Image (cartoon, rainbow, N blue to C red):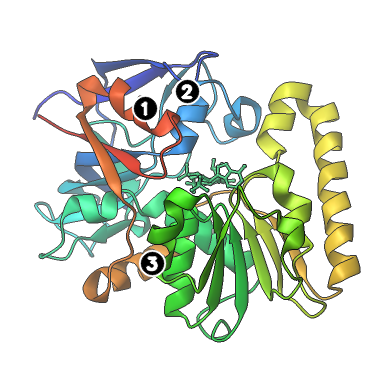
Amino acid sequence: MTTPMALVCQVGNNSTAPCLRWVPVPRRTLGHDEVRVTVRMASVNPIDVKRAGGYGQRILSLMGAGGRTLVLGNDFAGVVADVGRDVADVLPGDRVWGLVPTGGQGSHRSEVCVPSRWVRPLPRAAEMTAVVALPYTFTTLWRALKAIRLHEHNAAGRHVLVNGAGGALGQLAIQLLSRWGAQVTAVCSQGSATRCLALGAAQVIDRHNTPLAELPSVFDATLNFGAWADEAGVVDRLHRSALGHATTVHPLLADIDAQGWLRGSLSCWRSWRGMYRRVHDLAPQARYAWVVFKPDEDALNTIEASLLTHPLQIDVAHRAPFHHADSAFAHVGQGHPTRAVLVSDL
Ligand SMILES: NC(=O)c1ccc[n+]([C@@H]2O[C@H](COP(=O)([O-])OP(=O)(O)OC[C@H]3O[C@@H](n4cnc5c(N)ncnc54)[C@H](OP(=O)(O)O)[C@@H]3O)[C@@H](O)[C@H]2O)c1
C-alpha cells in the first residue's frame, strides 16, 4: 500500500493565498462501521477557502476542526480500498462518493475513513466529476428546506424566492424546487440569469438593478444564500401565511471569531432575535432558521436517487492535482459560482 498523503493547510489571515502542502501522513485505523476510500477527487467549496483564512475557528474547534494546521474538504469520490467488519453495503473495488463530516479528518487527502452511512455507490454510467461537488452544498440546501418544512410533498405550486441564486446553493435550490413543482424567483446578477432560467427558475430578478424592496410580499418561502446585508429585504417578501425563511449567510461563525464567545454570542442572539421578530410580525406561523452544514442521510439518498434519473448539477470549472491545489483555492476564492475539484495523480 502507498503512503497516505494529505493536503495540509497552514491557517493564516489571507484567504486568497492559503499555504497548502501535500505531505505524507500516518494511516488511520479503520473502525468496524467505516469504509476506507482511496480518494480520486475532492471538491473545494467556499467554506474551505474561508477556513484557510481563519474563518470559523472558535465554533469549528468544538467539532475538532480548529487549529493552525487543518486538512480541509468535505466531499470526495473514489474507490473502496477496505471495509470494516460491520459494513455490508459496499465492497473493495466499488466506485463511491460521499461526505466527511466537519471534524479532524477532511477529504483533501489520498484516503479517507468514513462511517458507511456517509458513503454511497456511484452508478456505473456516472462520472465522478458529476457528483463530487454535490454532497456538502446539497446537504446544506436540504437542511435549509427541512428547517422551514418545505419538501417534495408540499412544494408544488408554492412561490419561493431565492437570493444568491447565481451560486451553487442557489442553482441546486432552483433545480430541486422546480422539480418539486414550485415556482422559483431567482435573485442573481445578470451574468447568472440565463443559467438560472435553464435550470428551472420561473423568473429572474437582476440584483444590481432591482432592489429587493421593490418585489411584492407574495412568497411562501424565502432563502438567503447571498449576503446577510440582504436578510431583512428577503424576509420582508414573505406573505402572512408563509412557511418560513432560511439563511446560510448568517453571522454566527464570524461574530464569534471576531468578538469571542460571550460578546459574539450576544451579538448573534440580537441579530437572530431581531430577524425572528420581523418574520413573526409578517407571518405568525413562519419558521426562521440559521442553517449550519451537518451530514444528513436523506440528503445523500436524494442525490443518489437523482443520479439514476436526472442528476442534480453543480458546474465544475477547474481541476487541479492535489499537489497544485493553490489554483483550485484561487478559483473558488475569486467568487466564481462554479466549483474546483482536486484530482489524485497517485
Ligand atoms: N452556514 C453554512 O453551513 C453554509 C454552508 C454552505 C454555504 N454557506 C454560505 O452560503 C453562501 C452561498 O454558498 P454557495 O455555495 O452558493 O456560494 P457560491 O457558489 O460562491 O455563490 C455565491 C453567489 O452568490 C451571489 N452573491 C454574491 N454576493 C451577493 C450579494 N451581496 N447578494 C446576493 N447574491 C450575492 C453571486 O452570484 P451572482 O453574482 O450571480 O448573483 C455568487 O456567485 C456562501 O456565503 C457560503 O459561504 C454557508
For the residue labelled by badge 2, is the local secondary structure a helix, a strand or a loop?
A: helix
Asked whether residue 168 appears in the rendered view, the answer is no
The residue sitting at 34% across, 42% down in the picture is: 339
* Label placed on residue 52: 2
Q: Could you tell me which quadrant the C terminus lies in? A: top left
Which residue, given by chain and number where applicable, does mark 3 sit on?
199
> In this rendering, is residue 242 above or below 5?
below
Q: 63 or 56: which is nearer to us?
A: 56
For the residue labelled by badge 1, is the local secondary structure a helix, a strand or a loop?
A: helix
Query: Marks 2 and 3, how far apart in space?
Result: 31 Å
> In this rendering, is residue 214 above or below 108?
below
Which residue, given by chain and number where applicable, does mark 1 sit on?
329
Left-right relation of 42 to 179: left
Query: Of tags 2 and 3, which is closer to the observer?
Result: 3
Disc 2 and disc 1 in contact, CB within 8 angstroms: yes
Kind of residue sitting beneath label 2: Ala
Ligand 1 within 8 Å of disc 2? The answer is no
Q: 180 or 11: which is nearer to us?
A: 180
Left-right relation of 67 to 105: right
Q: 20 or 112: which is nearer to us?
A: 20
Query: Marks 3 and 1, how far apart in space?
Result: 26 Å
Measured from the top left, where is residue 147 in percent x and y?
A: 65, 65
